[in-house]
Amino acid sequence: MYRRNIRHILIPLAIGLALLIGYNLFLKPLHPSLTSPTETVESVPPPPAPPQSKPSQSESRLVRALDQTVIPSTPHQSLLEGIRDEVEKHNLSLAEHKLKALPASVLSDGQSKPFVAILWNNLGLQQERLQGTGASINAFKRAAELDDTNPIILMNLAQAYWEQRDRALNAEFLTKLMKVAPDDPFPHLAMADLLQEQDDLNGATMHLAQASQRVKQDPALQSYLATVTAKVQRTRSVESRMTARSSTHFVVKFDGEEDQSTWTSVLEILEEAYRDIGQKFGQFPTKPIMVVLHAKESFQSSTGSPAWADGLYDPTLGRIQIPTQGATTDRKWLATVLRHEYVHALLHDRLGPHAATLPTWLNEGLAMQLAGDSWPDLKETMHGEIKVIPLTSLEGPWGGLSAEASIVAYSEANSAVNYLLERWGMARIDDLVKAFQAKASVATAFQDKLLISYEQFQRQWLERFEQARS
């Protein structure tokens, strides 16, 4: 390989570098006037993104701060300077208190108002850095209320909404964001994702085309574009010929000839589950849930589910999916499957992008307990010869389990969550779920919320599990 001589470039570069180092080591400290008294970081990286089915917006851009060094020359200058200093010193509670206490005269002043919006925005960035996205939403909302024309403020608010799966990230908000930030692809991607979940595939396709024209310079958003595009195409290919019916809280799509009695049964079961399970769990979905009934022969190929699955909740597409086999003849089976998958949908809606942090055994056990599952196979397993699977081995996906191992896994999940309910109650389990929503590890969540180590819990549960089988 030919090695080009770059000596004529390196020599002056080395001289320049030496001068720069000398300036920083010897000259700059002697001249305070050369250093800005408010050297703030203009771009604060977001916290690590949780495992999830689609890329976080925070992977595609750095959360951006606004310049707060130049305070407008108004009668309120000293008051605003004091708040700015508290933000820079990370006295966030004090800064927030002072911002909330600002008199109306400051907020009505044409020069001060945009700067107050900047302070709220930068406070939100610091809150997110230290406490997570959930702590920053109110600050970003305050900033947007004061200045809804600033694209950086609105993009930061959009990111917070997206991370928290906040319903405020709706079509109206995204349309405003497109006008304020016309060259940014994210609003179009988020709109396409939203429309896909609402089953508006034509609208989703249109916004994907808009996003693809704007996304070329951002590899992370290119990945998000590919993810959303695959979702829309997959939904279109599988569901384009289906018939849909809806109730207050559900949309049901049916593959095959329309059957009024099936629609009625499915929607009645789902609405009853909405009321019953919602009261038990203290949680209701933030948006209508889609349910897809597949023909028997296409269920497995369309969903990629294991052969032993009777149904599933697809978090990527945001749908409950079940085969129609038995749906028209066995209402008890239909109710069991729909209620079980509804709990999964409810948990995913609750946890949002952090749903993957919930151990599968806890997810499945909650679905069985809250849905009131009664499986004959489980009763047989409890009194047969089995090889116990450690709960630590049941935290990840179960798709690779054999049919026999899956029965053991469901038996253990059901038993473990039943033990949690009897000993700690639903309120404490809800605290446990909140810990996973905050991205806590399994060990940390158990120790902090139940005051017991994960290992100790497993030992105590296993003793009870073995006693129940003897």
Image: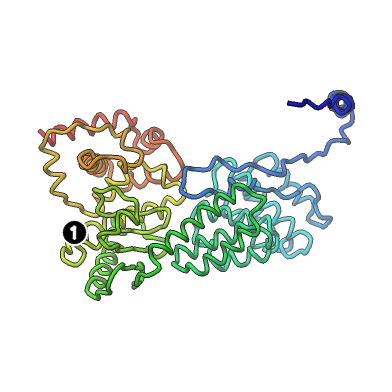
Where does the image place residue 439, in percent across and percent down from the top left? 46, 41
120 over 454 or under it: above or below: below
Residue 442 appearing in the image: yes
Task: Please tell me which residue lies in front, 107 or 465.
Answer: 465
Tag 1's secondary structure? Answer: helix
Locate the C terminus and report the quarter of the image it occupies: top left
Report the side of 149 relative to 234 (left or right). right
Quickly name the residue at label 1: 333
Total numbered circles:
1
Residue 40 appears at what percent x and percent y? 74, 41
Residue 408 at x, y percent in the picture = 21, 39
**Scheme of image coloration:** rainbow
- Badge 1, how many Cα within 10 Å: few under 14, some, many 20+? some
Towards the viewer: 222 or 361: 222
Q: Relative to residue 385, is residue 429 depicted above or below? A: below
Instruction: Name the residue rendered at 32%, 48% in the picture.
Output: 427
Horizontally, residue 49 falls left or right of residue 247, namely: right
Residue nearest the observer in this picture, 165 or 68: 165
Residue at point 73%, 26% (across, down): 1
Point out residue 413 in the picture as x, y percentages from the top left corner.
25, 41
Q: Is residue 92 left or right of residue 116?
A: left
Residue drawn at x 84%, y 36% is 35
Q: Residue furthest front?
A: 1
The answer to whether any part of residue 423 appears in the image is no
Q: Amino acid at mark 1?
A: Trp
Left or right? Give the position of 120 relative to 396: right
